[in-house]
Amino acid sequence: MGLTQIKTRMHTALEQAGRAPDAAQLIAVSKMQPDARVRAVLDEGHRVFGENKVQEAAGKWPGFREEFDNVTVHLIGPLQSNKARQAMELFDAIHSIDRPKIAQTIARLAQELGHCPDLFVQVNTGAEPQKAGILPQDADAFITDCRRLDLPLQGVMCIPPVDEEPSLHFALLRKIAQRNGLTGLSMGMSDDFERALALGATHIRVGSAIFGART
Ligand SMILES: *Cc1c(COP(=O)(O)O)cnc(C)c1O
């Protein structure tokens, strides 16, 4: 596939949905990709990346940031409280806020550090027991709690169950965002980003379709 093709497909999907060409951001998910592939995408001019592990990102992005200007990196994987400080120093956005404890920890660290990444509440739209995310029925109350903590909430994020039609989950996520007055919708991956864009995604997270299969 590659970056150029994905961007073309992205713009076509936005156009077909009657949305502006810049209505969504492409997050290139570089987790478990060899540095050479990441560098190639940086050389092509792309600057927005996603990682799912704090440790892996810490080994990779400080170096690339020294070489390339204006890089932004999003944490799209689960976050433990004991890694929160490091995550807040490394990432421009965190998509996996999903429980009171991590919200409280981040609020406290934001006070201390004087800055906070953009935050997304992860919703477990399929209510899968093994998956991270707040349950859909608890999302409104949790979003209210995050606002009381003054957290800079940008939107909501979901990872649909693998064996279900993702559009149902994207539509549910959009409904949760709308009724809570949130504009950010982090949804859509390599296999379903066009459907996510049709349903209003503002941040799509695409890995293997850009970089190739993970090593
Ligand atoms: C790995 C990952 C992606 C990208 O998946 P692809 O299928 O490679 O596009 C997107 N979102 C999250 C949360 C991920 O962990």
Image (tube, rainbow, N blue to C red):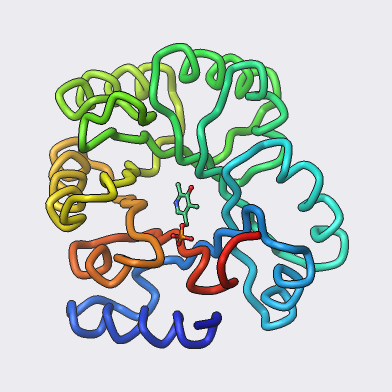
Task: Using the image as rendered, state which of residue 1 and residue 104 is in the foreground.
Answer: 1
Depicted 215 relative to depicted 177: above or below = below
Q: Which quarter shows the C terminus? A: bottom right
Residue 48, given in percent of the width and then of the height, sits at 59, 63
Lateral position of residue 18 relative to residue 160, left or right: left
Lateral position of residue 212 relative to residue 67, left or right: left
Residue 61, given in percent of the width and then of the height, sits at 77, 52
Depicted 95 relative to depicted 81: above or below = below
Q: Residue at x 55, y 15 (%)?
A: 105
Q: Residue at x 52, y 87 (%)?
A: 4
Task: Give residue 99's quadrant in the image.
Answer: top left
Depicted 97 relative to depicted 196: above or below = above
Task: Using the image as rendered, state which of residue 204 and residue 34 is in the foreground.
Answer: 34
Depicted 211 relative to depicted 88: above or below = below
Lateral position of residue 132 relative to residue 70, left or right: left
Residue 60, given in percent of the width and then of the height, sits at 79, 52
Task: Using the image as rendered, state which of residue 101 and residue 22 is in the foreground.
Answer: 101
Q: Residue at x 55, y 59 (%)?
A: 29
Q: Residue at x 46, y 41 (%)?
A: 95
Task: Using the image as rendered, state which of residue 208 and residue 54 is in the foreground.
Answer: 208
Residue 16, given in percent of the width and then of the height, sits at 19, 84
The number of numbered badges drawn on the structure is 0
